[in-house]
Image (cartoon, rainbow, N blue to C red):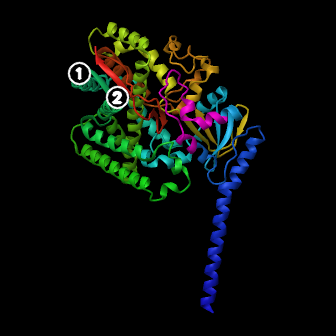
Amino acid sequence: MKVQFDSQFFTSIVFISFVALLFRLYTSFVHKPNVLRSKLRKQGISGPPPTILLGNLMEIMKSQLTIPISHSFLTHNTASLVFPKFEEWRKQYGEVFVFSFGNIQSLCVSQTDMIKEITTYTSFDLGLPPFHKKLFRPLLGDGILTSNGTTWAHHRKILAPELYIDKVKGMVNIISEAGESLLNLWNSKIEAQSGVADINIDEDLKIFSGNVISRACFGSDYSKGQEIFLKLGALQEVGFSWKNLSSAVPGMRYLPTKTNRKSWILAKEVKSLILQVVKERKEKTSFEKDLLQMVIEGAKKSNLTQEAGDNFIIDNCKNIYLAGFESTAVVSSWCLMLLASNQNWQDRARAEVLEICRGRIPDLDMLSKMKQLTMIIHETLRLYPPAPLLLRHAFKDMKFGNIDVPKGTGLWILIISLHTNPDIWGDDAYKFNPERFANGVAGACKHPHAYMPFGVGPRICLGQNLAILELKMLIALILSNFSFSLSPRYIHSPALGITMKPDHGVQLLVRKL
C-alpha cells in the first residue's frame, strides 16, 4: 500500500513539474512576446511575423549566410551587406519596426530624434540586453562592455581616468615604436618581392595594435600580454560571428558542441594566463603605472573576495583587449583600403604628412596639424564603424519620442545604416568623400547624433582617444614611407563579428617611396 502511495505521489510530482515547465515555456515564448507586440502594434508599429521559439532569428541567420562577396567598392552601401534583412524590413515597415530576436521583442530604430533620446538617456533603467552578456560571457565576462547599473559605473570609474586624453598622450612613444616595427616588416617584404610586395595587411596591423595595447596594459609584461591577446583573438574567431547566431538560441551555449567545447577551453587558458601575470605582478617590489596595475588596485579597493577580485581583473583585461586591440586594427585596415582605392586622397594626405613631418617621426603637435588625415579617418569611421550596431534594453516601461516602450523590449540602432543614410548625408552618402568633414563633425551632417563610430552618451567607448591617436600615427608613418594600391586579389567583403571587419582581409600592393 505504501509503495503504491509513493508511486502515485512521485507521479503527481513529475506531472506537476511538467505542467509548471510547460507553463513557464508558454509564458516566455508565447504570452510575454504577444503582450509586448500587442502594446507596440496598438501604437502603429509593425514588423515581420515571428515563429514561436526562434522569432526571426532564422531569417537573420539565413541572410547572413547568403551575403554576396564583391569586387566592386566604388560605392559603400555597407548596411546592405552586413544587415541585409534589416534593410529589407526597414524599407517594408518604416523607421521603427519590431522584430523577434529569439523570444526577445526588439525595436529597430532609425528615427534621429528618438535615437538622440535613447543614446543620451542616463538612468540605469536602460542598459545592455541580458542576452548580450550571456552570448559574450566566454569572451568578455562581466566587464565594462557587458555590465549594467552600479557594476558598470564601478568599472568605468576605475578604467576611464587611465584612458583620458592626458594619459593617452603619454603613449605616443609606445605607438611610434610599434609603427616603426611595422615599417621594418614591410620593408623586408618589399625587398623579398623585388620592390613590390603583395601584402595581406590585416595580420600585420593586428601585430601593431597588439603591441601597443600589450605595452599600455601590461607594461614590461607585454610579451605575456600578447600571448593572452592571441588566445582571446582565437576565442573570438571560434564562435562570435553573425553567420553563427545559433548560440543565441536559448540553452544552446550550454550544449557540449564542438564550438562550445573549444570556446570553454580557450576561456580557461586565458583565465590561467591572466592570473599568472597578476600573481607575478603582485610579487614584484617595483611599481608599474599601467592599465593592469590600475585594475589590480581597483579590485583591491573594492574589498572583493579572492574569486570576485580575480574575475574583476580577468574580465576587464578581456574588455581592454577588445576595445583597444580589435577596433584599431580593423579600422586601420579599412582606412588603408579606402586610400588604396582613392589615389587622389592618398596623394593629398601624403603631401600633408611629408610637409609637416619633414622626415621626422610624428609627435603630438605634428599629428594635430594633419587636417587631411583627420578628415580621412572620420570618413573611414563613417563608412566602416568598428561597432556598427548599438544595443539597449528597457528594464522598465519608458517613453522615447512618441513611443511607449514596454519593459523587456530591446532597442537596436544600426549605426552603419545611420552613417550612410542619404537623407542625412546627401546623395553621395555611399561614396568616400572626406571633404564632407572639412568643417568638423558638426558641419558634416544635419544631425549630430547621426555620427557615432564609438557610440555616444554615457556609454561612449573609453578607448576612442587611444584609437584615434594610433590611427593617425600609423597611417602617417605608412604614407611617409610607402605608396600602395589594391591588389587584384582583394575581395570586398565586410563581415560582422564583434566588429565589422574585411572577411577576406585587405590585400595591398606596397612600394617603398
Q: Residue at x 62, y 38 (%)?
A: 411
Residue 235: which numbered mark, if any?
none
Local packing at callout 1 (Cα closer than 10 Å; few below 14, some 14-19, many 20+) is: few
Report helix, strand or loop for mark 2. helix
Q: Residue at x 34, y 28 (%)?
A: 201
Mark 2 or mark 1, whichever is nearer to me: 1
Q: Where does residue 298 sit, x and y in percent of width and height?
A: 38, 41
- At label 1, the amino acid type is Ser
| Residue type, label 2 | Ile
Dividing the picture into quarters, in which one does residue 174 lie? top left
Image quadrant where one finds the C terminus: top left
Per the image, the residue denoted by label 2 is: 201
Magenta part of the chain: 61-89
Residue 164 in sight in this render:
no
In the rendered image, the quadrant that contains the N terminus is bottom right
Judging by the rendered image, the residue that carries numbered circle 1 is 194
